Image: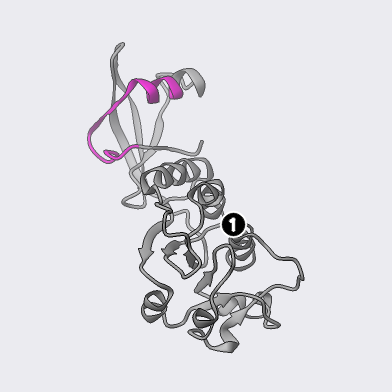
């Protein structure tokens, strides 16, 4: 783990709850005399703390110093993702964070099942853990849009990932925002919302699941 997340990092003292204390000192086996590094994921600083006092109920750490340490992807990538089953999103969200995706907007597309409700609190926990492990100094920003039409009106330079002879690899340096469909893809009406030259695909005849497609896009465009 490259650092530990704590929302109060940057203050003169922070309190460590029992579960986090157990993880740091029993699972990770940190010595109580060692410096511990924290981020609050609100700024780009990393904060160095040391144990000030410890008892059975809580551990208090005192701030020793800080420095700006930016660990971010070189390229920004915003993915508009038509809603799919939340469990499938949860399986790949950490990988997308590690691949450097900057932002995901979940879209209520025509083929999205409206019963799906995304647990943003759970996704944020998964993203925080991913950034702690990878060292990334931020997490993916998460948003939601009512429809593909609304999303495209707010992100006019968007590309669309669909079956096409125009390949992602040929234009990936130009892509900052791209939309991917849910199971079943896009409706005929939704496809007409994007200019034909901005509909791109990959050199494969296989049909990808939505979660496989989003990992493929992030791998090709971000890395």
Q: What residue do we see at 53% from left, 45% from top?
A: 134
The residue closer to the viewer here, 126 or 86, is 86
Q: What residue do we see at 43% from left, 47% from top?
A: 123
- Residue 47 is left or right of residue 137, and the answer is left
| 17 to 169, vertically: above or below | above
Q: What residue do we see at 42% from left, 54% from top?
A: 115
| 15 to 98, vertically: above or below | above
The residue closer to the viewer here, 165 or 55, is 165
Residue 42, percent across and down? 31, 51
Residue 168, percent across and down? 65, 75
Residue farthest left in this picture: 12
Q: Quadrant of the C terminus?
A: bottom right
Model colouring: one colour
Residue 151 falls in image quadrant: bottom left
Provide the residue designation for mark 1.
Answer: 211
- Residue 217 is left or right of residue 82, and the answer is right
Q: Is residue 21 highlighted in magenta?
A: yes
- Residue 108 is left or right of residue 60, and the answer is right
| 27 to 70, vertically: above or below | above
The residue closer to the viewer here, 128 or 156, is 156
Residue farthest top in this picture: 56
Residue 25, percent across and down? 44, 20
Mark 1 Cα-neighbour bin, 10 Å: few <14, some 14–19, many ≥20: many
Residue 177, percent across and down? 49, 73
Give the number of marks. 1
Task: Please report the bounds of the magenta region as a residue range.
Answer: 6-24
In terms of secondary structure, where does tag 1 sit? helix
| 106 to 87, vertically: above or below | below
Q: What residue do we see at 53% from left, 88% from top?
A: 195
């Amino acid at each position: 783990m490259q650092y530990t997340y704590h929302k109060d990092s940057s203050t003169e003292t922070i309190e460590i709850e029992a579960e986090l204390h157990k993880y740091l000192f029993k699972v990770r086996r940190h010595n109580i005399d060692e410096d511990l590094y924290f981020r609050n994921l609100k700024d780009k600083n990393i904060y160095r703390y040391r144990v000030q006092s410890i008892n059975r109920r809580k551990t208090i750490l005192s701030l020793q110093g800080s420095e700006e340490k930016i660990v971010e992807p070189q390229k920004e990538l915003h993915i508009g993702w038509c809603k799919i089953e939340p469990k499938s999103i949860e399986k790949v969200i950490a990988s997308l964070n590690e691949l450097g995706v900057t932002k995901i907007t979940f879209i209520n597309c025509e083929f999205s099942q409206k019963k799906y409700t995304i647990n943003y609190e759970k996704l944020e926990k998964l993203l925080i853990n991913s950034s702690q492990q990878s060292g990334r100094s931020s997490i993916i920003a998460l948003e939601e849009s009512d429809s593909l039409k609304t999303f495209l009106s707010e992100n006019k330079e968007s590309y669309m990932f669909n079956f096409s002879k125009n390949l992602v690899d040929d234009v990936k340096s130009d892509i900052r925002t791209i939309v991917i469909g849910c199971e079943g893809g896009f409706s005929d009406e939704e496809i007409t919302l994007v200019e034909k030259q901005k509909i791109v695909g990959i050199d494969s005849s296989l049909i990808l699941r939505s979660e496989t497609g989003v990992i493929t896009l992030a791998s090709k465009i971000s890395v």
